[in-house]
């Protein structure tokens, strides 16, 4: 991922998220859909399945230097695939939240790799800070996923909170898009 994409893509994501929160802050369909995500079987299939597939792709492409126990990535892929499938049956609670956390961490990794070593562009730190903040939040919600439900309840308890977060996301996303075009 290039420096341009590593700044532009998070900016576009934040703009879309901010617009959704601003427009749908008072909309009961948007609010009820977002509140249902932590325990939704559809969200679980989307986020956990997508996160597991992305992680398995990363494991499949690990370098020979990273393979300590086995000579091929195949056993690692099979072990992690079995764990991902077993989680669906044995730990189904809040699996959508954990899947979203996996996707967030993997996306932040790609973004940070695109920003790495670009020291002559200090504005890249706006995207770097966002990526690290997303990783910290994802690690927290992966450890205590029921807190994501509580956070969504708190966020949607008042329309003003939802709109404030939407406006902040929209503004930060616009800032990242502008920064992306200055490189």
Image (cartoon, rainbow, N blue to C red):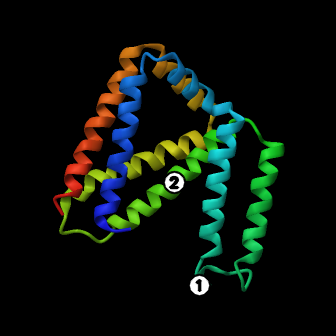
Residue located at (29% from left, 65% from top)? 3
What is the x, y in percent for residue 33? Answer: 57, 26
Q: Secondary structure at mark 1?
A: helix
**Residue ID at (51%, 16%):** 28
Question: Residue placed farthest to the top in the image?
Answer: 158
Which residue corresponds to the image point at 20% horizontal and 56% vertical from the top-left? 123
Q: Point out residue 164 in the picture as x, y percentages from the top left corner.
A: 32, 24
Quadrant of res 61: bottom right
Q: Residues within 10 Å of mark 2 (few under 14, many from 20)?
A: many
Label located before the other in sequence (2 or 1): 1
Q: Quadrant of the C terminus?
A: bottom left
Q: Residue 114: image x %, image y %?
A: 36, 66
Could you say which quadrant of the image residue 16 lies in? Answer: top left
Q: Which residue is mark 2?
A: 105
Picture coordinates of residue 10, whole percent (x, y): 36, 50
The residue sitting at 34% across, 47% down in the picture is: 12
Side of 146 relative to 69 (left or right):
left
Residue at disc 2, secondary structure: helix
* 10 Å crowding of disc 1: few (<14), some (14-19), many (20+): few
Q: Nearer the viewer, residue 107 or 143?
A: 107
Q: Are marks 2 and 1 in contact (CB under 8 Å)?
A: no
Number of numbered labels in the structure image: 2
| Residue 30 image label | none
Marking on residue 65: 1
- Position of residue 123 in the picture relative to residue 50 (left or right): left
Res. 63 image quadrant: bottom right
Give the answer, above or below, for where 19 lies relative to 66. Answer: above
Q: Is residue 23 left or right of residue 65?
A: left
Tell me how far mark 2 sits from mark 1, CA to CA.
22 Å
Query: In the rendered view, does 41 fall on the left or right side of 110?
Result: right
Quadrant, the N terminus: bottom left
């Amino acid at each position: 991922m290039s420096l341009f994409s590593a700044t532009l893509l998070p900016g576009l994501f934040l703009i879309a998220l901010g617009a959704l929160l601003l427009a749908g802050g008072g909309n009961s369909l948007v609010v009820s859909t977002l509140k249902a995500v932590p325990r939704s079987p559809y969200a679980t299939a989307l986020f956990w399945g997508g996160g597991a597939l992305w992680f398995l792709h990363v494991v499949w492409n690990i370098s020979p230097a990273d393979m300590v126990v086995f000579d091929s990535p195949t056993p690692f892929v099979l072990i992690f695939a079995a764990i991902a499938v077993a989680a669906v049956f044995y730990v189904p609670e809040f699996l959508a939240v954990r899947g979203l956390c996996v996707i967030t961490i993997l996306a932040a990794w790609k973004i940070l790799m695109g920003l790495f070593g670009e020291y002559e562009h200090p504005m890249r730190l706006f995207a770097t800070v966002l990526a690290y903040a997303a990783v910290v939040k994802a690690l927290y919600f992966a450890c205590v996923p029921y807190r994501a439900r509580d956070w969504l309840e708190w966020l949607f308890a008042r329309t003003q909170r939802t709109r404030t977060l939407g406006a902040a996301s929209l503004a930060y996303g616009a800032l990242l898009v502008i920064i992306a075009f200055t490189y």
